Protein backbone atom coordinates (compact mmCIF):
# COMPACT_ATOMS: atom_id res chain seq x y z
CA UNK A 1 0.00 0.00 0.00
CA UNK A 2 1.27 3.47 -0.86
CA UNK A 3 2.12 5.69 2.11
CA UNK A 4 -0.23 8.56 2.95
CA UNK A 5 0.12 11.51 5.26
CA UNK A 6 -1.98 14.21 6.93
CA UNK A 7 -0.74 17.14 9.01
CA UNK A 8 -3.31 18.49 11.43
CA UNK A 9 -3.13 21.64 13.55
CA UNK A 10 -5.04 21.42 16.82
CA UNK A 11 -6.27 24.92 17.49
CA UNK A 12 -8.59 26.33 20.13
CA UNK A 13 -8.91 28.39 23.25
CA UNK A 14 -6.66 27.59 26.16
CA UNK A 15 -7.99 24.66 28.20
CA UNK A 16 -10.05 23.21 25.32
CA UNK A 17 -8.11 19.97 25.75
CA UNK A 18 -5.72 20.06 22.77
CA UNK A 19 -2.80 18.51 24.64
CA UNK A 20 -5.04 15.93 26.28
CA UNK A 21 -6.23 14.94 22.79
CA UNK A 22 -2.68 14.59 21.43
CA UNK A 23 -1.73 12.37 24.38
CA UNK A 24 -4.88 10.31 23.93
CA UNK A 25 -4.14 9.77 20.23
CA UNK A 26 -0.47 8.95 20.73
CA UNK A 27 -1.17 6.78 23.78
CA UNK A 28 1.54 8.43 25.90
CA UNK A 29 2.19 11.83 27.44
CA UNK A 30 4.04 13.93 24.90
CA UNK A 31 2.47 17.22 25.93
CA UNK A 32 1.69 18.29 29.47
CA UNK A 33 -1.85 19.21 30.49
CA UNK A 34 -3.12 21.38 33.30
CA UNK A 35 -6.34 23.07 34.32
CA UNK A 36 -4.43 26.36 34.49
CA UNK A 37 -4.46 28.50 31.36
CA UNK A 38 -1.76 28.71 28.67
CA UNK A 39 -0.14 25.43 29.58
CA UNK A 40 1.33 24.68 26.16
CA UNK A 41 3.97 27.14 25.04
CA UNK A 42 5.97 25.23 22.43
CA UNK A 43 4.70 23.67 19.23
CA UNK A 44 4.58 19.97 20.08
CA UNK A 45 4.10 17.15 17.63
CA UNK A 46 2.24 13.94 18.27
CA UNK A 47 2.45 11.26 15.61
CA UNK A 48 0.29 8.19 15.05
CA UNK A 49 0.28 5.69 12.21
CA UNK A 50 -2.83 3.84 11.11
CA UNK A 51 -2.14 1.26 8.40
CA UNK A 52 -0.48 3.20 5.59
CA UNK A 53 -1.51 6.61 7.00
CA UNK A 54 0.75 8.82 9.08
CA UNK A 55 -1.20 11.44 11.04
CA UNK A 56 0.87 14.28 12.47
CA UNK A 57 -0.79 16.48 15.06
CA UNK A 58 0.55 19.91 15.95
CA UNK A 59 -0.42 20.77 19.49
CA UNK A 60 -0.48 24.57 19.46
CA UNK A 61 -0.58 27.14 22.29
CA UNK A 62 -4.15 28.17 23.18
CA UNK A 63 -5.54 31.08 21.17
CA UNK A 64 -6.24 33.46 24.04
CA UNK A 65 -2.96 34.50 25.56
CA UNK A 66 -2.44 36.01 28.98
CA UNK A 67 -2.06 39.51 27.64
CA UNK A 68 0.70 41.68 29.15
CA UNK A 69 1.38 39.27 32.02
CA UNK A 70 3.15 36.81 29.82
CA UNK A 71 6.52 37.72 28.42
CA UNK A 72 6.45 34.84 26.01
CA UNK A 73 3.24 35.93 24.28
CA UNK A 74 5.06 36.64 21.02
CA UNK A 75 6.68 33.22 21.09
CA UNK A 76 3.27 31.58 21.63
CA UNK A 77 1.84 33.35 18.61
CA UNK A 78 4.78 32.34 16.42
CA UNK A 79 4.44 28.71 17.51
CA UNK A 80 0.70 28.78 16.89
CA UNK A 81 1.02 30.12 13.35
CA UNK A 82 3.92 27.85 12.53
CA UNK A 83 1.68 24.90 13.39
CA UNK A 84 -1.16 26.22 11.28
CA UNK A 85 1.03 27.12 8.30
CA UNK A 86 2.50 23.65 7.99
CA UNK A 87 -0.82 21.83 8.23
CA UNK A 88 -3.27 20.39 5.70
CA UNK A 89 -6.19 20.60 8.10
CA UNK A 90 -7.25 22.58 11.17
CA UNK A 91 -9.15 20.96 13.99
CA UNK A 92 -10.83 23.72 15.95
CA UNK A 93 -11.34 22.20 19.38
CA UNK A 94 -14.08 23.51 21.66
CA UNK A 95 -14.69 22.87 25.35
CA UNK A 96 -18.36 21.78 25.19
CA UNK A 97 -18.89 22.77 28.79
CA UNK A 98 -17.83 26.38 28.16
CA UNK A 99 -18.94 27.31 24.67
CA UNK A 100 -18.33 30.94 23.85
CA UNK A 101 -19.89 31.36 20.40
CA UNK A 102 -18.48 34.86 19.99
CA UNK A 103 -14.93 33.57 20.31
CA UNK A 104 -15.71 30.67 17.97
CA UNK A 105 -16.89 33.13 15.29
CA UNK A 106 -13.96 35.47 15.85
CA UNK A 107 -11.34 32.75 15.74
CA UNK A 108 -12.77 30.97 12.73
CA UNK A 109 -12.81 34.32 10.99
CA UNK A 110 -9.09 34.61 11.67
CA UNK A 111 -8.42 31.06 10.47
CA UNK A 112 -10.61 31.16 7.33
CA UNK A 113 -8.18 33.23 5.16
CA UNK A 114 -5.56 30.49 5.56
CA UNK A 115 -7.77 28.46 3.15
CA UNK A 116 -6.96 25.35 5.15
CA UNK A 117 -9.96 23.11 5.70
CA UNK A 118 -11.41 23.48 9.19
CA UNK A 119 -13.32 20.87 11.09
CA UNK A 120 -14.89 21.46 14.48
CA UNK A 121 -14.49 19.02 17.32
CA UNK A 122 -16.47 19.41 20.54
CA UNK A 123 -14.44 18.03 23.42
CA UNK A 124 -15.37 17.14 27.04
CA UNK A 125 -18.57 15.50 25.86
CA UNK A 126 -18.50 13.52 29.11
CA UNK A 127 -19.57 16.70 30.91
CA UNK A 128 -22.67 17.65 28.89
CA UNK A 129 -25.78 16.41 27.15
CA UNK A 130 -24.86 15.98 23.48
CA UNK A 131 -28.28 17.20 22.27
CA UNK A 132 -27.48 20.68 23.56
CA UNK A 133 -24.87 20.97 20.81
CA UNK A 134 -27.34 20.66 17.92
CA UNK A 135 -28.52 24.31 17.89
CA UNK A 136 -24.90 25.45 18.24
CA UNK A 137 -23.78 23.33 15.29
CA UNK A 138 -26.68 24.79 13.28
CA UNK A 139 -25.64 28.34 14.15
CA UNK A 140 -21.98 27.82 13.25
CA UNK A 141 -22.83 26.21 9.92
CA UNK A 142 -25.08 29.17 9.06
CA UNK A 143 -22.07 31.49 9.36
CA UNK A 144 -19.30 29.37 7.89
CA UNK A 145 -18.90 26.68 5.28
CA UNK A 146 -18.04 24.04 7.82
CA UNK A 147 -19.77 20.73 7.53
CA UNK A 148 -17.64 18.43 9.63
CA UNK A 149 -18.48 18.31 13.33
CA UNK A 150 -17.36 15.66 15.79
CA UNK A 151 -17.94 15.08 19.48
CA UNK A 152 -15.29 13.52 21.68
CA UNK A 153 -13.95 13.18 25.17
CA UNK A 154 -10.16 13.32 24.97
CA UNK A 155 -9.85 12.53 28.66
CA UNK A 156 -11.97 9.38 28.52
CA UNK A 157 -11.12 8.37 24.94
CA UNK A 158 -14.69 8.63 23.64
CA UNK A 159 -15.25 9.28 19.93
CA UNK A 160 -11.52 9.64 19.24
CA UNK A 161 -11.28 6.48 17.14
CA UNK A 162 -14.19 7.66 14.99
CA UNK A 163 -12.47 11.01 14.52
CA UNK A 164 -9.21 9.30 13.45
CA UNK A 165 -11.06 7.03 11.01
CA UNK A 166 -12.52 10.12 9.37
CA UNK A 167 -9.17 11.92 9.30
CA UNK A 168 -7.44 9.11 7.42
CA UNK A 169 -9.97 9.56 4.61
CA UNK A 170 -8.43 13.01 4.08
CA UNK A 171 -4.77 11.94 4.01
CA UNK A 172 -2.76 12.37 0.82
CA UNK A 173 -0.29 10.15 -0.98
CA UNK A 174 3.16 11.15 0.18
CA UNK A 175 6.22 9.80 1.98
CA UNK A 176 6.00 9.54 5.75
CA UNK A 177 7.92 12.26 7.57
CA UNK A 178 8.64 10.23 10.70
CA UNK A 179 9.80 6.70 11.44
CA UNK A 180 7.28 4.04 12.40
CA UNK A 181 8.05 4.20 16.14
CA UNK A 182 8.37 7.97 16.53
CA UNK A 183 5.54 9.50 18.53
CA UNK A 184 6.83 13.05 19.00
CA UNK A 185 9.46 15.49 17.87
CA UNK A 186 10.45 16.18 21.47
CA UNK A 187 12.90 14.12 23.51
CA UNK A 188 12.87 12.91 27.12
CA UNK A 189 14.93 15.89 28.27
CA UNK A 190 12.23 18.22 26.98
CA UNK A 191 9.51 16.24 28.78
CA UNK A 192 11.44 16.42 32.07
CA UNK A 193 11.64 20.21 31.76
CA UNK A 194 7.94 20.39 30.93
CA UNK A 195 7.11 18.37 34.06
CA UNK A 196 8.85 20.93 36.26
CA UNK A 197 7.11 23.76 34.40
CA UNK A 198 3.84 21.94 35.05
CA UNK A 199 4.67 21.67 38.76
CA UNK A 200 5.40 25.39 38.91
CA UNK A 201 2.16 26.10 37.05
CA UNK A 202 0.28 23.96 39.56
CA UNK A 203 1.79 25.37 42.76
CA UNK A 204 2.48 29.01 41.93
CA UNK A 205 0.12 31.74 40.90
CA UNK A 206 -0.24 34.74 38.64
CA UNK A 207 2.42 35.66 36.15
CA UNK A 208 5.34 33.89 37.79
CA UNK A 209 4.90 30.41 36.30
CA UNK A 210 4.87 31.87 32.80
CA UNK A 211 8.08 33.78 33.22
CA UNK A 212 10.59 31.21 34.39
CA UNK A 213 13.14 29.39 32.28
CA UNK A 214 14.09 25.81 33.10
CA UNK A 215 17.15 23.98 31.82
CA UNK A 216 18.68 20.56 32.34
CA UNK A 217 22.26 20.73 33.55
CA UNK A 218 22.52 16.93 33.82
CA UNK A 219 20.34 14.25 32.22
CA UNK A 220 21.87 10.86 32.82
CA UNK A 221 20.57 7.28 32.63
CA UNK A 222 22.17 5.56 35.65
CA UNK A 223 21.09 2.09 34.52
CA UNK A 224 18.11 0.65 32.69
CA UNK A 225 15.69 1.67 35.43
CA UNK A 226 17.07 4.87 36.90
CA UNK A 227 17.54 8.40 35.73
CA UNK A 228 19.36 11.33 37.31
CA UNK A 229 18.38 14.88 36.36
CA UNK A 230 19.80 18.15 37.63
CA UNK A 231 17.74 21.18 36.65
CA UNK A 232 18.03 24.91 37.04
CA UNK A 233 15.05 27.20 37.34
CA UNK A 234 16.25 30.55 36.08
CA UNK A 235 14.44 33.73 37.05
CA UNK A 236 15.16 37.34 36.23
CA UNK A 237 13.85 38.87 39.42
CA UNK A 238 15.31 38.19 42.89
CA UNK A 239 11.86 38.62 44.42
CA UNK A 240 10.69 35.50 42.57
CA UNK A 241 13.36 33.36 44.18
CA UNK A 242 11.81 33.73 47.61
CA UNK A 243 8.38 32.86 46.23
CA UNK A 244 9.61 29.75 44.44
CA UNK A 245 11.58 28.53 47.45
CA UNK A 246 8.75 29.23 49.89
CA UNK A 247 9.03 29.32 53.67
CA UNK A 248 11.86 27.03 54.77
CA UNK A 249 12.03 25.74 51.17
CA UNK A 250 8.65 24.05 51.41
CA UNK A 251 7.43 25.26 48.00
CA UNK A 252 10.41 24.08 46.01
CA UNK A 253 10.24 20.76 47.86
CA UNK A 254 6.63 20.30 46.71
CA UNK A 255 7.51 21.36 43.15
CA UNK A 256 10.46 18.96 43.04
CA UNK A 257 8.45 16.03 44.38
CA UNK A 258 5.54 16.66 41.98
CA UNK A 259 7.87 16.92 38.99
CA UNK A 260 9.96 13.90 40.00
CA UNK A 261 6.84 11.76 40.30
CA UNK A 262 5.51 12.96 36.94
CA UNK A 263 8.82 12.35 35.16
CA UNK A 264 9.05 8.86 36.67
CA UNK A 265 5.51 8.05 35.52
CA UNK A 266 5.86 9.44 32.02
CA UNK A 267 9.38 8.29 31.18
CA UNK A 268 9.05 5.04 33.13
CA UNK A 269 12.38 5.49 34.90
CA UNK A 270 12.79 5.89 38.66
CA UNK A 271 13.98 9.47 38.59
CA UNK A 272 16.26 11.32 41.00
CA UNK A 273 15.55 14.99 40.38
CA UNK A 274 17.59 17.86 41.81
CA UNK A 275 16.48 21.46 41.33
CA UNK A 276 18.43 24.65 41.88
CA UNK A 277 16.86 28.11 41.64
CA UNK A 278 19.16 30.76 40.19
CA UNK A 279 18.77 34.39 39.25
CA UNK A 280 19.88 35.79 35.96
CA UNK A 281 20.32 39.55 35.49
CA UNK A 282 18.88 39.87 38.97
CA UNK A 283 17.11 43.08 39.82
N1 LIG B 1 -13.84 16.25 31.75
C1 LIG B 1 -12.93 16.38 30.78
N2 LIG B 1 -11.83 17.15 30.99
C2 LIG B 1 -10.94 17.27 29.98
C3 LIG B 1 -11.13 16.66 28.72
N3 LIG B 1 -10.09 16.99 27.93
C4 LIG B 1 -9.27 17.78 28.66
N4 LIG B 1 -9.78 17.95 29.91
C5 LIG B 1 -9.18 18.74 31.01
O1 LIG B 1 -9.12 20.11 30.62
C6 LIG B 1 -7.96 20.74 31.15
C7 LIG B 1 -7.15 21.41 30.05
O2 LIG B 1 -6.64 20.42 29.19
P1 LIG B 1 -5.35 20.70 28.27
O3 LIG B 1 -5.20 19.48 27.39
O4 LIG B 1 -4.18 21.10 29.08
O5 LIG B 1 -5.88 21.95 27.41
P2 LIG B 1 -5.15 22.72 26.22
O6 LIG B 1 -6.17 23.02 25.18
O7 LIG B 1 -3.94 21.98 25.76
O8 LIG B 1 -4.73 24.09 26.95
P3 LIG B 1 -3.52 25.13 26.63
O9 LIG B 1 -2.26 24.35 26.48
O10 LIG B 1 -3.52 26.03 27.79
O11 LIG B 1 -3.92 25.84 25.36
C8 LIG B 1 -7.17 19.65 31.89
O12 LIG B 1 -7.48 19.75 33.26
C9 LIG B 1 -7.73 18.34 31.28
O13 LIG B 1 -7.68 17.24 32.17
C10 LIG B 1 -12.31 15.85 28.53
O14 LIG B 1 -12.57 15.27 27.47
N5 LIG B 1 -13.17 15.78 29.58
MG1 LIG C 1 -1.97 22.47 25.80
Image: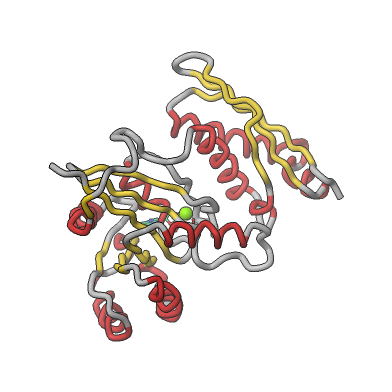
User: Can you name the residue that lies furthest to the right here?
Assistant: 283
What residue is at 72 percent from the left and 33 percent from the top?
A: 276
> On the rendering, which quadrant does ligand 1 occupy?
bottom left
Residue 196, position as x, y percentages in the image: 59, 40
Residue 250, position as x, y percentages in the image: 70, 37
Colour logic: secondary structure
User: Can you name the residue that lies furthest to the left here?
Assistant: 1
What residue is at 56 percent from the left and 45 percent from the top?
A: 198
* Residue 33 position (above or below residue 15): above
* Residue 203 position (above or below residue 65): above
Question: Viewed as shown, does residue 30 lie left or right of 157?
Answer: right
Residue 87 placement: quadrant: bottom left
What residue is at 34 percent from the left and 68 percent from the top?
A: 116
User: Can you name the residue that lies furthest to the top here?
Assistant: 223
* Residue 109 position (above or below residue 31): below
Question: Viewed as shown, does residue 181 lie left or right of 166?
Answer: right
Q: Where the N terminus falls, by quadrant? A: top left
Residue 131 placement: quadrant: bottom left
What residue is at 49 percent from the left and 23 percent from the top?
A: 270
Quick one: 169 or 281, which is closer to the camera? 169
User: Can you name the residue that lies furthest to the front here?
Assistant: 174
Question: Viewed as shown, does residue 11 lie left or right of 222?
Answer: left
Residue 132 placement: quadrant: bottom left
Residue 184, position as x, y percentages in the image: 40, 40
* Residue 188 position (above or below residue 171): above
Residue 234, position as x, y percentages in the image: 72, 41
Q: How many marks?
A: 0
Amino acid sequence: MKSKILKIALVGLTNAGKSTLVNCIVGETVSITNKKINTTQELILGITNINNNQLIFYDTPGLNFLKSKIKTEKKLKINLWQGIDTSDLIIYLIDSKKIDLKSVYENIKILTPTKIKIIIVFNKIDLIDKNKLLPIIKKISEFYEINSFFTISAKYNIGVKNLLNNLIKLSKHDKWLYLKDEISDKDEGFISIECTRNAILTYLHDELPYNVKIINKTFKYLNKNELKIKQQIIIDNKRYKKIILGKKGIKIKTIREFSQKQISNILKYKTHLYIEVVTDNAN
